[in-house]
Amino acid sequence: MAWVEYERDRGRYLAAAIVYYAMVSLIPLCLLLLATLGLLLRVSSIAAAIQEQMLLRIESSFGSQLRETIGQLLNTLKRESIVASAISLIGLVLTASILFHHLRMTFRVIWKYQPPLIAGPVSVVVRETILEKLISFVMVLSAGILLFVALVLVSVTQWLNRLLGRLSLPSQTGWLLTALTSLIIAAITFAPLLKFMPPVRLRWRDIWLAVFLCSVAWVVTTELLALYAAFFGSSHSAYGVVGGILALMLSMNIVSQFLFYGAELCKVKATGKRVVQ
């Protein structure tokens, strides 16, 4: 029944549209990461020492020309890090808010709800527009909090892996711990989306199956992407870069498909029947 609703609502096409907005959001995110690196090189003596060691290794392995090129790039990052950080942060907030806005509209389509911005008095349209923007920004801030929680879980996992290594436990234990942490992080990410994105109030028991399905899909997809990077990511040619981008887009498309199928599954479990016969 959920699959019928998924096909009826054209979920695969909605997922492809979301991939576009997600890719747009990745551009300021990458710029922010580079700007953060520049700030670290600017204010941290430890980062500066690591930079110098890395440049020495590059010079010994690939020659002085590559060392000078990378050194100039890092110096540019240090000089322009503050301005780049501000611009990329603003761009990330704007693009992420647009992404969350379209996610909200997609969930309204799934639940057969009209968009909030429809024909009406100007005051109502303005109020609804401001409300939508505020909700999108709140979702971006919530995503930042979830990212912080995920980083804490990753740090704890790495500490436990080192502890298990010192205890000489089997390597499969560390792999299972990493997989379990990835599953927990994915569940923390998908649960709020499936709970609060729909235009109706859902119970937690209505979404747990969809959260588990989306989390498993995320873990499997990221593992496959890591395998692709391990076997084909060493190519520095244009073909390798294009292949990596295509693999990333494909993995995002798969995760988006599972997300919207999970939304249909939540709808079926919450209503007990199809919304539209």
Image (tube, grey):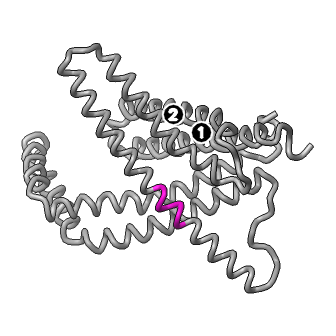
Rendering quarter of residue 108: bottom right
- What residue is shown at x 57% (from left), y 71% (from top)? 134
Residue 143 percent across, percent down from the top left: 47, 55
Say which quadrant the C terminus sits in. top right
Residue 103 percent across, percent down from the top left: 63, 56
Q: On the image, numbered disc 1 is attached to which residue?
A: 254
Q: Please name whichever residue, 6 or 190, is drawn nearer the observer in this view of the structure.
A: 190
Mark 1: amino acid = Ile
Q: Which residues are magenta?
A: 137-143
Distance between the alpha carbons at the discs numbered 1 and 2 = 8 Å
- What residue is shown at x 58% (from left), y 32% (from top)? 212
Q: On the image, numbered disc 2 is attached to which residue?
A: 221
Q: Please name whichever residue, 137 or 253, is drawn nearer the observer in this view of the structure.
A: 137
Label 1: how many Cα within 10 Å (few below 14, some 14–19, many 20+):
some
Relative to 275, say whether 79 is above or below.
Answer: below
Residue 183 percent across, percent down from the top left: 48, 33
Relative to 173, say whether 111 is above or below.
Answer: below
Mark 1 vs 2, N-terminal side: 2
Mark 2: amino acid = Thr
Q: Is residue 147 left or right of residue 220?
A: left
Q: Main secondary structure of the magenta part?
A: helix
Q: Is residue 163 left or right of residue 52?
A: right
- What residue is shown at x 82% (from left), y 80% (from top)? 120
Rendering quarter of residue 179: top left
Name the outermost residue toward the right.
277
Instruction: Say what secondary structure mark 1 lies in.
Output: helix
Rendering quarter of residue 169: top left
